[in-house]
Image (cartoon, grey):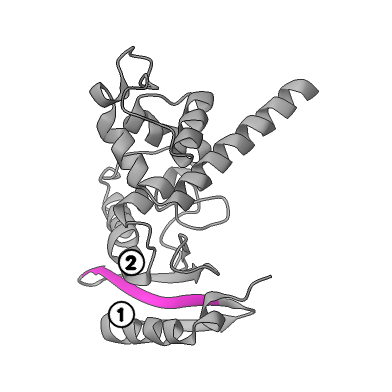
């Protein structure tokens, strides 16, 4: 097993601590059992503070951290965009990865998905609607994202398209996966270009999640 990022690169840990002191002085680093946590409070607007526990992954900043709200303000329910493990559902990893250019450093995470999530929760606390739209969780959310990008949420079509993208096979004269009958460059070209520019590990992550879901459902159908 490889060592965590802060052991491989102590300078990165010092850089993280410097960033917190300079920009987020109420957040602090804790190293526990080979894992790096950032804990403390953050204000999303004046006089509206949240208490957080952020677990940075072993390959930080290349993967999405887990973020918990630990002050008891957010009910641990899917309807409030909290995952079964209690962590906040910050969004579909593919969308976040594209928006953040594949870098999940502490500043990017705090300033975009975390801050947006917490502001949304504050609005809900005041009786307003969740401002970010409701996205399904897990594989369903991944498929919704591809439906917006390439016009299909069919698992087999999406997984085939992803595999071809990763292998560099797709060309603009190919039939669009949405089934319109048009070639890709005259149909969902923008979505295709967005996917092509996404970090490859994110595409692998999406493909792996879809394929595991297909396998699980196939086994369940056979057993039934």
Judge by depth and name the residue closer to the eye, 191 or 26. Answer: 191
SS class, disc 2: helix
Residue 57 included in the magenta stretch of the image: no
Query: Mark 2 and 1 residues: CB-CB less than 8 Å, in contact?
Result: yes
What residue is drawn where x is 28% and y is 71%?
Answer: 43
Residue at which label 2 appears: 110
Tag on residue 24?
A: 1
Q: Earlier in the sequence, mark 2 or mark 1?
A: 1
Q: Which residue is located at x 31 percent, y 70 percent?
A: 107
* Whole-percent x, y for residue 148 in the image: 33, 31
Q: Indicate whether residue 44 is drawn in magenta.
A: yes
Q: Position of residue 110 (x, y in %)?
A: 33, 66
Q: Residues within 10 Å of mark 2 (few under 14, many from 20)?
A: some
- Residue 160 versus residue 132 in the image, above or below: above
* Residue 138 picture location, percent across and down: 51, 41
- Front residue of this view, candidates 23 and 93: 93
| Number of dots carrying numbers | 2
Res. 224 in view? no
Q: Position of residue 136 (x, y in %)?
A: 44, 37
Question: The N terminus appears in which quarter of the rendering?
Answer: bottom right
Residue pushed farthest top? 181
Q: Residue furthest right?
A: 223
Dominant secondary-structure state across the stretch colored magenta: strand
Question: Is any atom of residue 41 visible in this view?
Answer: yes
Magenta segment boundaries in residue numbering = 36-45
How dense is the environment of label 1, judged by Cα within 10 Å: few (below 14), some, or many (20 and up)?
some
Which quadrant of the figure has residue 47? bottom left
Q: Residue furthest left?
A: 46
């Amino acid at each position: 097993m490889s060592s965590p990022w802060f052991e491989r690169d102590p300078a990165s840990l010092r850089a993280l601590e410097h960033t917190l002191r300079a920009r987020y002085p109420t957040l602090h680093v804790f190293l526990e059992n080979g894992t790096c946590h950032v804990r403390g409070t953050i204000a999303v607007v004046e006089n509206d503070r949240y208490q957080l526990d952020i677990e940075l992954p072993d390959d930080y900043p290349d993967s999405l951290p887990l973020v918990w709200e630990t002050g008891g303000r957010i009910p641990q329910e899917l309807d409030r965009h909290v995952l079964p493990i209690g962590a906040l559902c910050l969004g579909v990893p593919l969308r976040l990865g594209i928006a953040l250019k594949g870098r999940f450093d502490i500043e990017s995470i705090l300033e975009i998905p975390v801050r947006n999530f917490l502001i949304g929760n504050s609005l809900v606390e005041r009786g307003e609607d969740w401002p970010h739209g409701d996205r399904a969780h897990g594989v369903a959310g991944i498929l919704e994202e591809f439906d917006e990008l390439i016009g299909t949420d069919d698992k087999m079509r999406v997984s085939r398209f992803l595999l071809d993208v990763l292998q560099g096979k797709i060309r603009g004269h190919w039939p669009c996966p949405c089934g319109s009958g048009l070639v890709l460059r005259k149909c969902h070209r923008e979505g295709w270009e967005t996917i092509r520019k996404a970090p490859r590990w994110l595409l692998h992550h999406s493909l792996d999640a879809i394929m595991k879901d297909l396998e699980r459902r196939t086994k369940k159908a056979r057993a039934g």
